Image (spheres, rainbow, N blue to C red):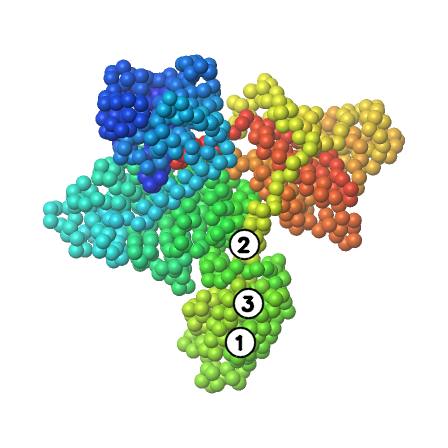
Amino acid sequence: MDDSAVPNPEQQPDYPQHWEADILLRDGGTARIRPITPADAGRLVEFYEQVSDQSKYFRFFAPYPRLSAKDVRRFTHHDFVNRVGLAVVIRDDFIATVRYDRIDAEGRPSATGTDAEVAFLVQDAHQGRGVASALLEHIAAVAQERGIRRFQAEVLPENRKMVKVFTDAGYTQRRSFADGVVHLEFSLEQTERSLAVMRAREHRAEARSVQRLLTPRSVAVIGVSRTPQTVGRAILRDLLGGAPAECPVYAVNRNAPPGTELDGIPVHRSVLDIPGPVDLAVIAVPEGAVPAAVAECGAHGVQGLVVVTAGYAETGPEGRDRQRALVRQARAAGMRVIGPNAFGLINTDPANPLNASLAPRLPGRGGFGIFCQSGAIGVALLEAAHKRGLGVSSFASVGNRADVSGNDFLQYWAEDEATRVVLLYLESFGNPRKFTRIARRLAAAKPIVVVKGARHTGSLPPGHAVPATATGLRDATVDALFEQAGVIRVATITELYDTGELLALQPLPPGDRVAVVGNSDSLGLLTYDALLGAGLRPRTPVDLTTAATGENFRIALDVALADPAVDAVIAVAIPPIGTSAHAFMGGRLTGEDDPAMGSDDPEIAAALLEAGQRAQELGKPLVLAHLALTDLPVRLRPGGIPAYAAPERAVHALANAVHYAQWRRRTAEAEETARVPELDRIDEPGARTLVAAALSTRTAIAARTQPGGARITLSDDEARDLLARYGIDVSSTRSAPDEETAVAAAASLGYPVALKATAPHLRHRPDLGSVRLDLTDEPGLRRAHRELDALLGGAAQAELVVQRMAPRGVDTVIGATVDPAVGAILSFGLAGAPAELLGDTAHRLVPATDQDVAGLIREVRAAPLLFGWRGAEAVDTAALEELLLRVSQLVDDVPEIASVDLEPVVVAPHGLAILGARVRVAPLPVRSDLGPRAMSTL
């Protein structure tokens, strides 16, 4: 890439570098958007010469064959406030431009108006690639940043493409026609439709970019060697072994003597020497030679790169800089990057087979789309699929994930009919918000099963680039993210395939009622216990005894499947023993190494296969749990019946399928019935005013320079006032620094009262004796005050307060915390050390619906305490759900609120009382998911 293509901010101090962005176009290619500067005069002239006369006419409403010097100056000199120009650049060439000029109400140039005229020009060769749509998103974001609220545009009626760009964008607009010109006006505020349009375009572009990588028409391997054991040579052999004749494979080695051949094909000294086009290049040269190889690929029009070379971000800061430079260089030339430090790509489509990886063989064709970030895990995933006889649709192991990510592949698999189940091994998130949005849409149609590494350490593998906001994602946050997106989280690679196999081969269970049928009472009981432990509802196991025949299995399975009170069936089987087994095994005992050990009765296999067909017809899953049977699972593969060598594995897989099916049903129902209720006593403007005032104080401004940012804790009175704006009433407290003040406070509030410490180190610590409850008179209050004063080192230091006693009920905790990477998270749990120690807290992403909060309070393990456990009176869960909805709406409406903690919230049989509240605020965070489409630049 020519460095002159990037304006130098030092030469132009007001240059808005943050407006630069890499974008994906509709066809999956890449480009860069950046401001136009005076240094671009030559590029602008050359660009204009490539535009057709018709496009020029559409832009200027008259023949305009060339730009004058005055025009060039006008279109390259901007103040980046009232006059702004952006260009789309590929390989250092302009392919499109856009410009706005601020105007007043009369349409004249202005420095204060909130309207602007906007105009586009796209090179004819690049029209239809979504260039103008992307430019509109970015110029609109720039204009809003500069205080412009509305765009105006004049378009000739015959310029239908440009009219369509404006009308399809989804903004609120007005259209009029006068003097032969269409006049458009549209607000720049995002609407639900404009966001939907933007995300639909994002989806198409990202899916297409992955499709281009997986279905190249030709492939080059750069860095092949005479040594057979080298990486480049191994990849070349793998490609040649599977590539069809219509997809030529080329070998490149800069030092190869003329006429060199390897594995039956000629070796070129450069990609530029290859006579035909190259869609995909696999780069396996030393790190120092990569930039030159990428430059040649860009010049030759290569569309994508698989960089297996290591030595980048995984080596430290200098390597990270090299990695960023690699991605910038590739994107500037229109190429996407798998890697660096990648294991590679695989596509098993018979029409487009591709093994651009270090895998020694192409896996069989099947329904699993697999993505991972680790080469070692990638090998394990492919090997596990091979051993189980499972097929793969496509596979990617992307190493440092500097460009193409799991989100891109999710977009592709949503469209890929061959992919039925998605398996992910993730070690980090580049964009958690986006992952949640994409995964939720995909999971509504196809299961996503995930193993998330670093569950307990939270550390990032070397080389993984993520935003600073996503480096410390708590595991509870990840669980909430997966739960709300419908993603199935498992702990091991074995469980990943156990669950994935069931989901790929069997119907989704219609419920959680499970029948157990088999020839072992003991194995049936183990399965029964495991089902109970997994939260499913098993029926009493049907024991056919060890002498069961295939006919016995057939009848019992048919009865179980036909039962309307059964949603799934687990068949359990052990090797035949006793007299009949003796005859079956040839009348002899077998040892562990005897080849006959693990054989099975073919009649049982036939009965299971017949039952499997019946189960498919009825829409009920059938799985096998067995012990020491090696032949039976193989016999069942043609019928798609998963077989597990332990009952716990079968149960875990089935439980995951049941919970996923329940999520699918809830989600479908929620689209029709779930709502965010209209609540009374909501004063959003008042809440915003209070938060703005808190953030404008000297303390808040000073805090912005401190480590960790500017989170400001509101005073108790400020927090109470803010919460009241959303109908959240916190019980009043009165300071009690001495006995007399405490007595006066109690008289004002009315007995009975509580006396408690509120100092930060004592807050919510009744185990330290910092609370006295049910004080019904003055003598009792005085006595309690003296006790706490002595126990806690002084009433003033303990910050004692008096509070009116709340009705008896269940103590709970409600919180909302804004995670910069994920968004606001609503939390609920019961108060007290046991719940805290056990981590018995449930979470939902904000905004929460009525169904979300109903599920939230029922999800914690201690939930029975709310519903009349052991004969106690049930508490007012309707009031609790309303409170959760109010907290959710508050943090959603006022994004400057960083956290809300309500503790304890005493929920009584009628109503509730909030006894403590803490609110923190912070400056408005940047929401990258709401801005114009742009690729990550980590």
Q: Nearer the viewer, mark 2 or mark 3?
A: 2
N-term-proximal mark, 1 vs 3: 1
**Where is residue 676, by image quadrant?**
top right
The x and y percentages for residue 302 are 25, 41
Closer to us: 114 or 490: 114
Q: Amino acid at mark 3?
A: Ile
Residue located farthest toward the left when viewing the structure as drawn: 258
The x and y percentages for residue 595 are 41, 76
Q: Image height check: is 366 above or below 332?
A: below
The residue depicted at 48 percent of the width and 78 percent of the height is 603
Residue 561 vs residue 130: left or right?
right
Q: Secondary structure at mark 1?
A: helix
The residue depicted at 57 percent of the width and 75 percent of the height is 556
**Where is residue 97, by image quadrant?**
top left
Is there CB contact under 8 Å for labels 2 and 3? Answer: no
**Could you tell me how many numbered marks the image carries?**
3
For the residues labelled 1 and 2, the Cα–Cα distance comes to: 29 Å
The residue depicted at 11 percent of the width and 49 percent of the height is 259
The x and y percentages for residue 658 are 56, 57
> For mark 2, what is the residue?
660
Q: Nearer the viewer, mark 1 or mark 3?
A: 1
Q: Secondary structure at mark 3?
A: strand
N-term-proximal mark, 1 vs 2: 1
Mark carried by residue 570 = 3
Q: Amino acid at mark 2?
A: Tyr
> Dot 2: few (<14), some (14–19), or many (≥20) neighbours within 10 Å?
many
Q: Amino acid at mark 1?
A: Arg
> For mark 1, what is the residue?
554
The x and y percentages for residue 410 are 43, 47
Mark carried by residue 600 = none
